[in-house]
Structures are given as C-alpha cells and as structure tokens.
Image (cartoon, rainbow, N blue to C red):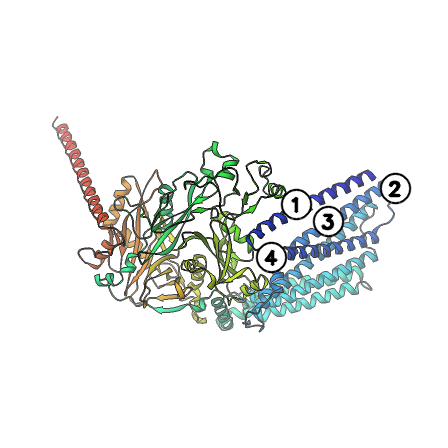
Amino acid sequence: MRRVRKWSLVLVALLFMFLVLWWARTVYTDILWFDQLGVRSVYTKILLLKLWLFVGGTMVSAAALSFTFYLAFRFSMGQSTLAFSADTFRLLGALLMAAAVLTVLIASPIFGSQAAGRWETMLLFFNKIDFGSTDAQFGMDLSFFVVTMRMLNFVQGWFMGLMITAVVASLALYAGIYSLRGLGLVLAPRMLKHLAVLGLLLMLTIAAGHALNVYDVVLSSNGVVFGATYTDINARIPVFWLLTGIALLAAAGFGISNYRGGLRLMVGFFSLWVIVFLLANFAYPALFQRLRVEPSEFDREAPYILRNIEATRAAYELDRVTEVLYPVAGTLTLQAIEDNRPTVDNIRLWDLQPLQDAYNQLQFMELYYQFLDMDSDRYVVDGRLRQVLVGARELDPVNLPPDAQNWVNQRLQYTHGYGISMSPATTFSPGEGRPEYFMQDIPIKGEFPISRPELYYGETPVNYAIVNTAMPEVDPKPGFLHYDGDGGVPLNSRLRRLAYAWQLTDINILLSDQITSDSRIQYRRDIRDRVGQIAPFLKLDHDPYPVLDTSGKLWWLLDAYTATNRYPYSTPFRVPLAGSDNTVVRSSLNYIRNSVKVVVDAYNGDVDFYVMDAEDPMLKMYRRAFPTLFQDGSEMPPDLRDHIRYPIGMFSTQARMYLRYHVTDAKVFFNQAEQWATPLETRFGKHGVRMTPSYVVLRNPGEEEEEFVLMLPFTPAGENKNNLVGWLIARNDSVNYGELISFQVPSNPQIDGPSQVEARIENDQRISQQFTLWEGAGSEVIRGQLLVIPIADTLIYVEPLYLQSEVLSLPELKKVIVADAEKVVMADTVDEAMIMLAGGGEPVPRPAGAGTSPESGALEELARLQEAVDGLGEALGKLQEALGSLRESLGGNTQ
C-alpha cells in the first residue's frame, strides 16, 4: 500500500512538472515572439489576466468541491456490514478517497479554464466605457447590455455549474460510501443538511439567472422582430420575476428544511419551481401571443418594430446611408461616352478568378511560386487613376519535386515569395485575350519600381522558416544569399533552439549545424494568424491585399472589426470573417465597426494598427486596455492611405441588412412590401448565382471626378420580381472614404435588372449562335461578372466573355457584351460595343495609354481578318464535302 502511494505521488509530481515545463516553454517562446514585434505588453496583460482567472477559478472550485467532499465523507463514514477485512476496507476507502481527489484535480482546472477563457469579458468590464445611448425599455446605457450583462451572465452560469457539480458529486460519493458499507442509500439528518445547503446555493444561482433574463429580453428572438416585443414585455418579464421569486422561495425552503420538513420539503419546493418554470416560461407566453397579440399584431408590435429598425440601422451604420434618386431617362449617346471617358476607360473586364488562373499559368515563373489570390486596387498610371488587379507571387514549396522536399530545402532555402504582378482591369491582348501588365515577370519590370520584392509574410499558410543560416536562400535576384531584415526571433542561444525544437516538434532546429548565432526563426507568417495572435479581440476580414508604396516596398493591408452579438434590439447577421487555414467563417453578430486598418510589412513582418473610427465605443475600451497598441489613422503613411479599401466583408453585411432596413416606416416594414433582394446572374458557368459586390472606378452621379467605389445592385424581393430598384455604393477615396450612398431608380418605367439582362443575352440569336460555335469547337464559354455602370442619365450592363480549353485552365478574354435598355451587343472591345449601342459609326479615338495602342489595334484588325479567312476556308471545305456526298448519292441512285 505504501509503495503504491509512493509511486502514485511520484507519477503525479512528474506529470505536474511536465505540465509546468510545457506551459513555461509556450510562455517563453511567445514572449520572444511578441517582444520581437514590440507588443510584449499586450501579451503579458492578456497572459496575466488569463492566469489570474485560471488560478482564481481553480482555487475557488477546488475549495468548494474539497469542502463538500470532506463533509460527505464525514457525514457518511461508519462501520461496514460486509465481510471485509480491515485492510481491505481501508484499501477500498482509500480508492474512494482517491476518486474524490481525482475529481477535484480534474474538475477544478476545467472550471479554471472556463474562467480563463472569458478573459475578454473581464477585460471589457474592467475598461468599460459608456456607449452614450440608452435602450428604449430600461433606459440603461448600452454598455450595460454589451459588457456588464455579458460578465454577469458568465459569473452566474459559472457558479451554477459549480453548484450542480457539487450536488451530483456529493450524491455519487454518498452512494459509493454506503455501497462500501453494504447499506442502501438512506439520507441521514446530517447528510440532508449538507444537501440542503448545496440546494440553497443552487437555487440562489438559479434565481440570479432568472433576474438576468429580465434584462436579456432586449436580445430576444421570439417575436416578430429581434429584441423585446409585446409578449416579451408583457408576459415574459413578469414570468421571469415570478420565477425569480419562486427560486428564492425554494432557496428559503431548502434552508428551512434543516430545521423541519427535511427531504420532503426540499423536494416539494424544487418541484414547485420546475412546474412553474414549465408552465409559466413556455405555456403562458405562447398563449398570450396567440390570444392577445396575433389578433391585432401590428398595433401591438409597432413600437417594438420601430425600436428594432432604429437599433439595427445604428448597429450596422445604415443610418448614415445617403439616399439619392437617380432618374434613368436618356439613351446612350456618343457625346455621353466622350463626357464620361474616364468611366468608360475604367470599366473592369477581368474577373479575379479567371485572372488568377491565367497568372498561375503565365506569371508563376518558378515551380515553387503561386498566386493564391487576386485583389482589386487602384494606382495612378501616367497621371490617370486606373483600376488594377494585383497578385502576390507567394511561396508554395509543396510543388517542389518529391526528391527536393527535404528539411534543408523547406526550412532554410525556399523561404519566401517574390514580388507581385499587376494588370489593368480593363484591357487584354488582341487576338490572344491574355492579360496586359503594369508589372510582370522575373526580374520584375513595369510601371513602378520595386526595391524589396521578397515576401516572407503573406496569405499562404506556409510553415516556419529559418533565415540567415550558413545555407544560402533560393531567390531569383542575382547575388541574393541571405535575409537582411530584422523579422523573426534570433536563435542566438541553445536554450532558444531547444525551446523552439520542442515548440515546433522539430529536433533539427536543435541539431542542425547550418543554424548560426545570426539565424532567425520566422513563424506565424500567415498575416491573418499573425494579426490574430497579437489582437485576438479583433475580428479580421478574410481578404488581405498587397500594396506597393512609392519607395518600392511591399506591404499587406488587412481590415479589422470590433463587433458584438449583444447590441439591444439589433437583428443579428452571420458576418463573413477570417477563419483558420485561409477559410471563411461566419459569426453571428449584431453590431460591427471597421474601426482598424492593419498594416503588415511583407519583408520584416512588423504589424501596425491604425484607428479609422475613433468614436467606436468598443474600440475605446480596447484602446483603454492596450494604450500602446493602436495609432491614430492620420499617422498611416500617405502612400498606404491612398490604397485603403472599404472591405467587402463589411459592405456585404451592410448591403444584406439594407435589403430590409432601408425601410423606416413600421407599417411598411411589417408588411414587407418594399423588401429588396440581391440579384441573380450567370457567372462562371453557373446560373442563378447571387451577385457579389464589385470594386469599380466610375464617376458617381452628381460628381465631377471618377473614383474607386464598391458597388452592389438591388432588385425587389419575391419571385419574378427582377427589375432594378437601385444600388448601394461605398466610397473609398480621400476624404469621402466610408460614405455610403443608395441610388434608387424610379419604378415607372421599370429598368431591367441583372437577371433580365442575362436572359436578353441568352435570347439574342447572334450571341447564342456564337456560343454554340465556340462550344462545338471544343472551347468552354465562361461568362464573367455582370457590371452595372451609370453613365450620365443612362445605365449600361457590361459582361466579359472568356474562352477556355477543356484540358488547360487558361481563360482568354475574347469578347465584351454590353447592354442598355434597348440593345444587347457583343464586340471585341468596350469602345466598339459602346459605339454600337449609341448607334455611331467609327470607334471614338482613345487617349494614349488607355486600352490598346495603335499597333495593338492593327494586330487586332489582322487577327479578325485571319479569323474571317479561316472561317471562309472552313466553309469552303464543308461545301466540297457536301458536293462529294451529293455525287456519291447521285451515283448510287443511277446504279
């Protein structure tokens, strides 16, 4: 027995030492990583808060469980009626004691971990700042519901869980002890008193939960709209107060049972609470809704509908949308084309996915590079604002030959990507239909200088790399051997190498003689993971994008959000956010602000957080907690600020909510008479695809200059309601950044919506015949995204057309389809299509640098001539075959 106890203690001690060392290793390497980035204070503050909550939660739960187990042993131990020897009885008793101790050792850290996991809840509570707005029901500042109630709900739930665990574990221990004694479970007076005290504490936590439920009705989803509705206010709140009183009465009953009534009184009061809970909490509100509310639902719910509309519009910033009537009256003219030449020259033809496929065939340059993503941006080229599509040439060591996939290659030599490729979104090479370039190839050449093309940090979730080793790195630039920056943690000691060998489970870090004291280990190189580790309290957009500054250095820009799901009365939406491994996850939120822009150095991995919305109360709390982490937006370098974009994730969320919440009249909202929908289109071989927001360069109605905007059109909701009702834009440039404008077209006459235009394209005989000819020749016809472009007082629709071989993923942009209210045309260029729509003759001359050059125009004419000759030859061949067949037929009939 002593030997078993001794070895048990040794094993427990070894396990404890291992866990301590494991935790210390993690903390040590994290401190090195955060310290290298200059944000150690952020990490230590979160770590200490987690540690405080874990230790506090573990100690409180351990003390509570230990004390209740002590009482259980004390009140139930006695002589056994079984024929056990004294040693056997002691052994079984020791095993039962060990089970109780093990329960405490397992349960206590679990409760501690639950407490530590709510570190952000406590952080916000300790740094709470008022929102400056109150809810309509209780008149309390919104921070009470967003912050304080979140903390109170956690504390109540934590203690209730602890009490339930104590009650269940105590009953199990009583049953085990009585079984050891050979007796049936009979609750002695002292045992009943013990359980009565536990029951009293449990009912108090339940009563607290019911009281908190009163204030949580502002987040109710039971009514006609989100938030407290008529039934919540007039039925559920009284029920919650009734349940609070019943729970307190039951707690008092448990206390009185110590003196009279005993078990029967405890069971009676608990049963009373259960019956009232089931009847009052479920049956009564349902009957109230059916009998009192539904017969005159709008009259009852109108005030609460208005609360929901007001709160939702404020939570998603829809209350700052400017509504503009856009009367579509005229037809496209040659003069309108000329007057809006910057818009016409910037009509985007290339879609992101086809261009990415083309880049991965034409611009990867080496096996170990890939274009993981394409992004839309704008740059000034030859003094003109041009929309461009940019792709970063990132590292993809998986594509190395199998015999080259060794540790030295993957960790020491193939360490980084190389530069970007950039194409105008509006032009393509004549004949071939391939992208044209502002930046291309290796060595990189183009319109902009690039001084630091190496990409050590990016979107690709590559593993760690060790730079500045004795082994030269692989790089396309002649003479490049070693990393020359300060990114990564220096491996200048055996302790660090040992710690990282353990952390990354790679013994080579410790053993390799290629690693020197100047070597640095770079990990967490996926920028979303990198930013998420520094600021885990921010929600991250799923689409970072590269930016080239005027000095030729590459950066990554990433949008970050503050958000909550506890904004009173605001309807939740599943917002697309960054997940692990480049995935997109949707989180249910009902308040969101794009308050932070994050800038990551693609070479060194440095991370800066710039504040874009200093009035956001959620961000104010985080800035109060971490005063050194954030910088004012005005401190962002101007050449990076010129490239900030309104994020698609934020805009998509606002647009989806605006479909219904553009209505501010309660009656109209209740009837859903003016609800909108996102249009359907045909895209990339699929029919009925929901349109997605598009970045475009255009001149907004009423403005004098073209600008970079994010745009999404709308149609009425309901089947067979496909006409256009308007579109929403977000402005991206200069002082107008973040402005939202809703352009609405009149309902009479109705304007064709995107799906109606798609149907007109498919019904056009000339276009459909051309589709059939291409598909018959073995090519796949790919229709790109349909764009809605306002020009003067006219709307045009533009859709690029790609051809792709069935055996190679290399789309070629061959044609452009353009439509207005009257015509649908297909041409080789936007200019030709626009002139055909306007009924003009020759194409309007294009300014220098806009689209195809004179030489490319001549080549295009030659290509068309060659195509005509080829078609004529093919027709003559078919005619000869037909004549031959006719001769054979006539000869056969003669015989």
Q: Which residue is mark 1?
A: 22
- Cα gap from disc 2 to disc 3, whole angstroms: 28 Å
Q: Label 4 crowding class (10 Å Cα cut-off): few <14, some 14-19, many 20+?
A: some
Q: Residues within 10 Å of mark 3 (few under 14, many from 20)?
A: some
Q: Which residue is mark 4?
A: 41
Say which label, 4 or 3, has the lower sequence index.
Answer: 4
Q: Is residue 83 left or right of residue 562?
A: right
Q: CA distance from mark 3 to mark 1?
A: 18 Å
Q: Nearer the viewer, mark 2 or mark 3?
A: 3
Q: Which amino acid lies under the numbered mark 2 shown in the image of this protein?
A: Ala
Look at the image and tell me in which quarter the N terminus lies.
top right
Q: Secondary structure at mark 4?
A: helix
Q: SS of the residue at dot 3?
A: helix
**Residue type pointed to by label 3:** Leu
| Sooner in the amino-acid sequence: mark 4 or mark 2 | 4
Q: Amino acid at mark 4?
A: Ser
Q: Nearer the viewer, mark 3 or mark 1?
A: 1
Viewer-nearest of discs 4 and 2:
4
Foreground tag (4 vs 3): 4
Label 4, label 3: how far apart the Cα atoms are:
32 Å
The residue that mark 2 highlights is 86
x and y percentages locating residue 303 in the rendered image:
50, 73
* Residue count near mark 2 (Cα–Cα under 10 Å), binned few <14, some 14–19, many ≥20: few
**In this figure, which residue is indicated by the disc labeled 3?**
105
Q: CA distance from mark 4 to mark 2?
A: 59 Å
- Looking at the image, tell me whether mark 3 or mark 1 is earlier in sequence order: 1
Mark 1 → mark 2, Cα distance in angstroms: 42 Å
Please give left or right for residue 182 compared with residue 558 in the image.
right
Q: Secondary structure at mark 2?
A: helix
At a point 36% along the width and 69% down the height, the residue shown is 324
Indicate the amino acid at tag 1.
Answer: Trp
